[in-house]
Image (spheres, rainbow, N blue to C red):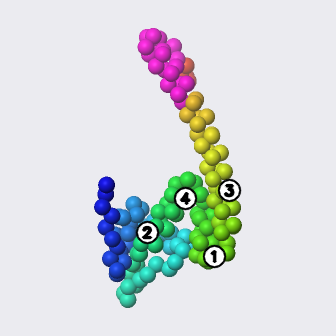
Amino acid sequence: MLEVKPIPEAGLTIAEAARRSGVSAHTLRYYERAGLVITRVDRTAGGRRRYRQLDLEWIKICTKLRATGMPIKVIRRYAELVGAGRGNEAERLALLEAHRAEVLDRLVELQENLRLIERKIGVYRGRLDAGDADGLWAPGG
């Protein structure tokens, strides 16, 4: 099991936050500019960003939502709702349920596409094993 290093009281630099969150410093800056943060990222007196545990946890959520294909505009809306605090949980739930439905639709499509690929692999394996793969269709051939 990996040991999770606690975040120092002063917070993490952008480079440290990038390393811990698995995204680039550029992505962290982009998330902030795009309005995806739920709280303002702390800064030092010199203006350098300092990330807290809450920031890293939120970055992880944004990264996972983005990986599922959630548009930045929708993540921004979700961040606005979360940042606004209590009272909008039903809207947050509706947003997540709508996205889940889209992800499930894409999964069905991906499974159909995977079945086609599996069939094609079976054809190629069978023809190669039979020694007559040269009879497979090839455009222009």
Q: Earlier in the sequence, mark 1 or mark 2?
A: 2
Is residue 141 visible to the viewer in this orientation of the structure? no
Q: Is residue 129 magenta?
A: yes
Secondary element under disc 4, as helix, strand or loop, is helix
Q: Are marks 2 and 3 in contact (CB under 8 Å)?
A: no
The label on residue 98 is 3
| Alpha-carbon span between mark 4 and mark 3 | 13 Å
CA gap, disc 1 and disc 2 = 21 Å
Segment tinted magenta in the rendering: 117-136
Q: Amino acid at mark 4?
A: Leu
Amino acid carrying mark 2 in the image = Leu
Residue located beneath label 4 in the image: 65
Q: Alpha-carbon neighbours of circle 2 within 10 Å: few (<14), some, or many (≥20)?
A: some
The residue pinned by badge 2 equals 56
Mark 3 crowdedness (10 Å alpha carbons): few <14, some 14-19, many ≥20? few
Q: Taking 32 as reference, is 109 above or below it?
A: above
